[in-house]
Image: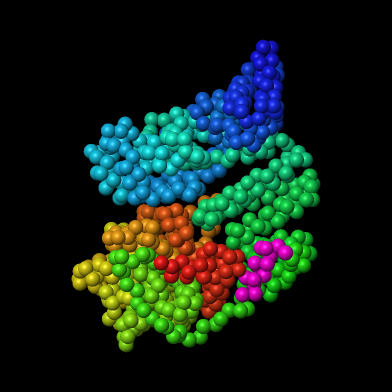
Amino acid sequence: MKKSRLEKTRERLLISIISISGKDNLEQCKQSLKQLKLSENNGHDRFFVIPDERIQALEDLLSAFGMDDDNFNFPSPVNITAICSNTAFDVDNIQYLKTHLGYQACQVVKKVNEEDDQLTTIAQIVHREHNFDCEIFIQFVLDKYSNTNEHILELLRHERVSTLREWADKFRSNRKIFLYHAYLPLISTFGNIKIQPCDIASDVEYGLVYVPSRTLIDYTLGKDEPHSLFLVIRPGEDRIHSLFTVVPIEISHLHWQLKEFPQDYPGRAKILLRIAEYYIEEARQNDKKNHLSALCCWQKAQNYYTDILSMKETAAKQDLDLAETGYCKCLLKQHRYSRINERLSARNRISSADLWLIYAQAQRNIGDYDAAKYGIQKALDLHSLDIDIKREEKAIKMKYERINVTKRLDFNCRSSSLDEQQPWYNILSIDGGGIRGIIPAIWLMELERKIRQPISSIFNIVAGTSTGAIIAAGLTTPSLDNKTMPRYQAFDLVELYRSKASRVFSGDQSTISRLRTSFLKEPKYMDTGRQALFQEYFGDATLSDSMSELIIPAVKNEGNVTDQFTRRASKQDPTNNFRLTDVLMCTTAAPTYFPAYRFNSTVYVDGGVQANNPAMIAYDHTLNSYRNCDRNRIRILSLGTGDFVSDPLNPEANRNLLFWARNHQSVFKILMDGPQNNIDLHLNSVLGDNYYRWQIWLENPIELDDKQDTTIDRLIDLAHGHLEEMEAYDNRHRLGCVIENLRSK
């Protein structure tokens, strides 16, 4: 009985201190709560049990004063069984971290891929403003540590080098920070992160769970608001298998309540709503940096709304209405417009301004502008002052105000130059994507129309992969009559996609030919049409002729290595001054669509195999090529060609294979062996407001060679619609802001 009285005394004392003493003794409260929770978890011979709701209430009260309980450095929990280190497991199915304080739900779980740039992997899971740039990390280590530091000595032994300078050279080409435990103290300090090593164990109640296994790694030096990162290291091993984060304690408590309360519990819907709202806020924050990292949160929120909507017999009508709106909003954010259309097709089911707004947004993205106008008017009738409704109304109206460009523009032209003393280096990067290249071509046509100057006058460096390389070369090749004028405007390239795509994708379409392509894995098209078109457009123009620095990647078929064809290299060594026709044949040799292209004693395949988004290549090239350039003097406009995510809970899965013939094993190997970095997230972290990424997220995939008129018209509408949406919603990436920034000194 002494123990029960002690527990009861602690609880009363804690409440009294919080109620009477204010913040002065909150640290004492925190320690009392910790002792109380530890005693509660020791379940033997307890006559007095404090309900979890009361403990949670005390936690919430402390949290309101900024005294959150600490999740780290607790001893391993009881009632678990260790899992042998050689036992196979799937981290995607492990949902909880278990400590002596109870269970916490895992939020983001990511397997460590040895092919990844692992600094970028941290940025994907720890969503902070911190810059996880390789060179900055190297400089941080060189500045802060000496060769005699205990952590550095361990690192040098593992890397088999003698000095930090040798380590830096090795690390630049092999950024494997999760290969050795020795990196963790450095990452803790560099990223302001508390790192908790964990193992996997079998729990009586929840199956496989994560459990703390080693001492907390905390070298944050008392910085404000350190982040938390958990990682899995199996017994007897040094390398890290996976990383994860956990949801806040209050959300974990809600998860626990869902497990404990029966399905017909009256308050269950409100608990689910609170959890869904948490994931929606996480999605909004993540979306500011990287859209892919937000998709998982939108999908999780949708799952909780689905649970509420299945409770029609027990949930209150207000909760069901909130869940319906939340569910449709999640579909919208995951680009599932047709599913919204199906769900809300019976318009008499729509009873709120929020749902009418979602309906209108979905119809606009589908391309049904009449239905979108109807929906937004209904929303205005219910809530005429809502700012988002007014913005959507503007986006819909802009469709009917589009200016149809029907001829070339008159330019007051000046070509760009790369002066070593210039204040800014403006980079244009254009993705690969076959026929979808008409999307960035439309965007660049609008940019030229706005500035009344050619692209080469505002961008010092232009990079393009595959179809993006055709655009990049077209906009930087000088006119035959006037070397200060570009040979082509973006308008000309839009017309190329509209009227000459069939010449690129030309070949024998007989039944026998299709069977040979399907069963013998022969290329779908021949080179002749593509090569003739390039010869017609570029003739004998070479890399050195380009009006801006030109960068075009292609992949060597044998060594799986990315080659870069650049104007700079062609000027430094005349033997590298290749014809643009040959360079474009190399970078557009898309496997399964075209045969590999033999050039200069090397066999090349499409640059998109390893560098479909060449923005990082252009960024590194600029830093390495121009003596006085640093990242604070670089601005990038990166243009996508449309992307599609089939599984929001695993958004990276098969994305690089999406537009290829997936059963072609050689393509699969090249794509999977190549480092697939999250370039968008990394450059956003490095450049901040000087990085612009325009991308369209497709509801359904559009293949490289889909040259039907209806497809091309749809792509044109999507391209214009994206510009209009950014303008209507006052997005910082909108065209006017980009132009203003690119022109500023």
The residue lying at 56 percent from left, 52 percent from top is 285
* Quadrant placement of the C terminus: bottom left
Q: Is residue 219 above or below residue 580?
A: above
Q: Where does the image place residue 558, in percent across and percent down from the top left?
A: 28, 60
Which range is magenta? Answer: 385-398
Q: Where does the image place residue 417, in percent across and percent down from the top left?
A: 32, 72
**Main SS category, magenta section:** helix
* Quadrant placement of the N terminus: top right
Relative depth, front residue between 172 and 690? 690
Camera sees residue 321: yes
Q: Quadrant of residue 573?
A: bottom left
Residue 643 placement, left or right of 49:
left
Camera sees residue 647: no
Q: Quadrant of residue 98?
A: top right
Q: Is residue 387 inside the magenta stretch?
A: yes
The residue lying at 45 percent from left, 48 percent from top is 130
Q: Is residue 146 above or below residue 400?
A: above
Residue 269 placement, left or right of 185:
right
Q: Where does the image place residue 229, in percent across and percent down from the top left?
A: 48, 39
Q: Is residue 203 inside the magenta stretch?
A: no
The residue lying at 59 percent from left, 33 percent from top is 67
Relative depth, front residue between 165 and 468? 165
Relative depth, front residue between 395 and 28? 28
The residue lying at 58 percent from left, 41 percent from top is 247
